[in-house]
Amino acid sequence: MKKGMASAGLTLAMMWIAHFLVDVMIGFWSVYKTISGVDLAIAGLIAGICPFIGEGMQLLFGSIGDRGYRKQLFLFGVAATGVSSLLPLYESYFYFFLIFLLTCIGSGAFHPTAVAITSGLTQKRKGLLITIFASGGALGLALSHMIFSLWYLHFQFSTAWLILPALVLVLYTATKTMPGASDRPAQAGRRYGFEALRKLFGYRDLRVLYFSQVCIQSIYWGMMFLLPDVLTSKGYPAWMCFGVGHFVYIIGGAFMMIPGGYLSDRFSARSVLLVSSTMGCALFYLFLLTPYLSIPAALILLALTGASLGMANPVAVALGNKIMPSRPGLVSAFLMGMVWCVAEWLGPGGGGLLTKLFSENAPTFALSTLGLLFCVGTALTALLPSTVDQEFELDLA
């Protein structure tokens, strides 16, 4: 019993560290495009197309993982995202696109696999464990701009060295056995992919949950992408624009993920999601539409906005796993990858293109326009059930 608990604890720790490293790499493009002066519309297209392809593959990777290949996908995902550290070595949009595409494909392989492994460690506390896992990614994403800026601008080291921790983790993990990494699928031999996706959309609660998350995550990712440019246009110092502002925005969500998971297990995921989206909307517009805030006030507001928006997706994923517990990899891919591939197209991609419509304070007005999705997302969340009375089973016979 103690050995099993120790093994599960080690696995959870490995998932947390891996998620930290993966999301550090994911965040590099959104700060590098500002530092290097890449056109926001082109940067937005890269930030939209690459996740649409890479994160959209989570459905395929989740399906493969549920067939018993979780460890292989885990190792590939951690290694592939590490190539983001090579961005400053090239000056071509073509290579920027290829590097970020491979990063997003690695993310698509990693996330549903790691969530499925984490979810399989418990039967009663899925929400808590998934949000613990998610907090590692949130911390990594929070530190990504700061790590990149310090390494590249302050210390002037080659960012290629930043891939080393990921490679060390891959080599270490390859020698270990992880509970749930090679489990036999719940319904071995069943083939599923786009047919499974169609049937998932056919189930009302999962469909509503999906579209509500697309709206909220579009705003979350759009703000993360344009935040360095918004802060720069408002006249804040470079240390805040290229690191600290992004950090407090993401870390606010990280701090609320575990309490959010606990509250969703204890009370209602629907209530948690409604409160987070309503508060997030108010804080989002207060930050954007106030011409200038003092640095402490701006940082506090960013942290609160991030806390409101950042906790939503792990709570939604945990709810989805309660609705259909027999396919954790597929459900996680549906509510993460299939959400993110659309949300990152609408958020960073759409936000970047919207900047072309405005001549002054373009990043701020682009985000304000994108924020109209709050209305749709909150309305859809209100349609979710307060409790899961009946589990849904995917029938692909």
Image (cartoon, rainbow, N blue to C red):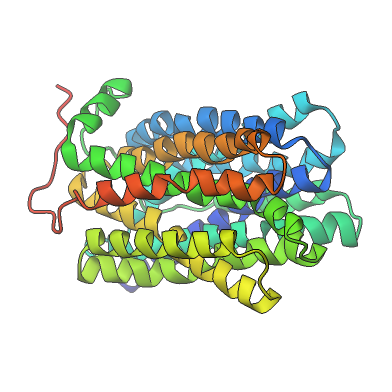
User: Residue at 19% of width from left, 43% of height from top?
Assistant: 205
**The N terminus sits in image quarter:** bottom left
For residue 227, above or below residue 308: above
Out of 341 and 38, give the one closest to the viewer.
38
Measuring from the top left, give residue 373's x and y in whole percent: 41, 44
For residue 384, above or below residue 55: below
For residue 364, above or below residue 150: above
For residue 52, above or below residue 155: above
Measuring from the top left, give residue 233's x and y in whole percent: 74, 55
Judged left or right of residue 87, residue 180 is left
Q: Inspect this view and state whether residue 6 appears.
A: no
Judged left or right of residue 306, residue 112 is left
Q: As drawn, which residue projects farthest toward the right? A: 156
Out of 88 and 361, give the one closest to the viewer.
361
User: Residue at 48% of width from left, 65% of height from top?
Assistant: 283
User: Residue at 79% of width from left, 40% of height from top?
Assistant: 86
Disc tally is 0
Out of 351 and 364, give the one closest to the viewer.
364
Measuring from the top left, give residue 31's x and y in whole percent: 73, 50
Judged left or right of residue 52, residue 328 is left
Q: Inspect this view and state whether residue 197 appears.
A: yes
**The C terminus sits in image quarter:** top left
Out of 287 and 343, give the one closest to the viewer.
287
